[in-house]
Amino acid sequence: MAPSKVNIHRMSRDLKNVLDDPPAGVSAWLPDESNSAFVEAQVIGPDDTPYSGGLFQLRVVFPDRYPMEPPNVKFKTKVYHPNVSHDGNICLSILNMPPKGNWSPSLSLRTVLISIQNLLSAPNPDDPLDAEAAKELKTQPHVFQSRATECTRIYANPNGPKASILARAAATEQPSASAAGPSGSASGEGPQGPLGNAEQERQRSGSGARQAGTTAGEAEAARGQNLTKRQSPVVEGRVGTSEVPPVQGQSSPDNTDHVASSSGQMQAMATGTLVLSAAGGDALAPPRSRLALGKRSRA
C-alpha cells in the first residue's frame, strides 16, 4: 500500500519543521528527494553522560499509514545502552502503538528525535533490550559507564575511523540524483566521481611525454635521411653525386655505419666496402675512390 498524498504531506511537514527549527544537538535530512518516507537523522550525545560528544546516526522510515502508525527508527551507530539492541532497535514507548506504547498521531518526527536524545541521558534498565548492559547499570554502574564511554569513543567519534566508515556506507546507500555515464571519460568523471587534480595532472604529463617522444622520433628520422643524402655511395664508372636508395646488402662489420629510423629498422650507409649494383648493369663490384676513377679517365 503506497502512502497517500495526505500522508506524504505530513511526512514532508514533519521534516520541514526539523530543518527550519532544529532542536539542540538534533538534525535530519532527506537523502533522496523523490522518497519522502526515508529520512536520515543524527543526535549528539548529551553532556554528563557516557555518550557525551558522540555523533549517533539514525535511520527513520515512515510507514504508509503515518501518522496513524509510528515511524520505524533504528540506530545506525553502535551504542552500548540498556534500551538499544545490538542491531540498533530502540525500546521507547512512543515508538509503539497502544496499549504497549504511547504513540499518538499528534506526535511528530521532532518529538521522536528529542525523546531518543533524552533516552541517552536517562536509560531504563527495567525494560531492556540489552540485558547485559541493564545488569551492569544496576549492579556495576562504574563498569557500565566505562564500557559505554569506550563504545562511544570508538564508534560515535565524529573524527574516528568507525564514523568515517559509517558515513561512507550511508552515502553508498543513497541513490545518486545525477548519475554519471558508464565510463564518464568525456567529462573526466567515472564511477567514483570527478577526477582529482593530481590525477588530471598525471594524465596531462603523460600526454605531453607521448607528444615529446613522437617529436623526438620524427627529428631522429629526419637526421637519418639527411645523413644518408650527404654520404650517398659512388657507383662504379662515375662520381656518385645523385641520391642512391639504401640497399639491403651485405657489408663489412667494421666499415658500415647504421642509422636507426623512427620505425626501429636499421638502414646501412656505405662508408667503405658496401657492394652496390652499377647503374644500368648486372654485375656487382666494390666501390672505388674518386682518385682511382680520375686516373682511369686520364688514361
Image (spheres, helix red, strand yellow):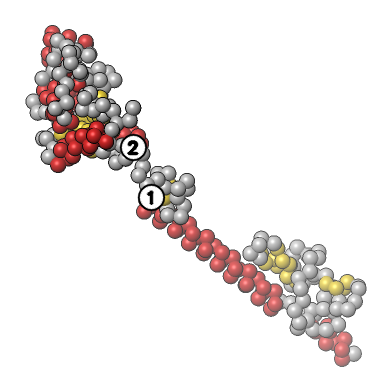
| Amino acid, disc 1 | Pro
Residue 25: name its quadrant: top left
Residue at the image point whose x is 14% and y is 42% from the top? 20
Q: How many marks?
A: 2
Q: Left of 49 or right of it: where is 38?
A: right
- Residue 46 visible in the displayed image: yes
Q: Circle 2 sits in a helix, a strand or a loop, which is it?
A: loop
Which amino acid type is marked by label 2? Answer: Gln
Q: Can you identify the residue that label 2 sits on?
A: 174
Comparing 202 with 287, the one in front is 202
Q: In the image, what residue occupies the spot 66% across and 62% down?
A: 263
Task: Tell which circle, 1 or 2, labels the residue nearer the N-terminal end.
Answer: 2
| Image location (x, y in percent) of residue 66 | 23, 28
Q: Secondary structure at mark 1?
A: strand
The answer to whether residue 201 is above or below residue 96 is below
> Mark 1 near mark 2, Cβ–Cβ under 8 Å?
no
Q: Position of residue 146 (x, y in %)?
A: 16, 19
Q: Compared to 292, does 26 lie above or below? A: above
70 vs 196, nearest the viewer: 70
Task: For residue 117, say whether it is visible.
Answer: no
Give me the disc on residue 194.
1
Instruction: Name the outermost residue toward the bottom.
Output: 298
Residue in the image at 26% along x and 38% along y? 30
Query: Quadrant where the N terminus lies?
Result: top left
Residue 40 x, y percent position in the rendering: 25, 34
| Nearest the eye: 60 or 261 | 60
Quadrant in the picture for residue 133? top left
> Alpha-carbon neighbours of circle 1 within 10 Å: few (<14), some, or many (≥20)?
some
Quarter of the image that includes the C terminus: bottom right
Q: Please state if 227 lies on the left or on the right of 135 as rendered.
A: right
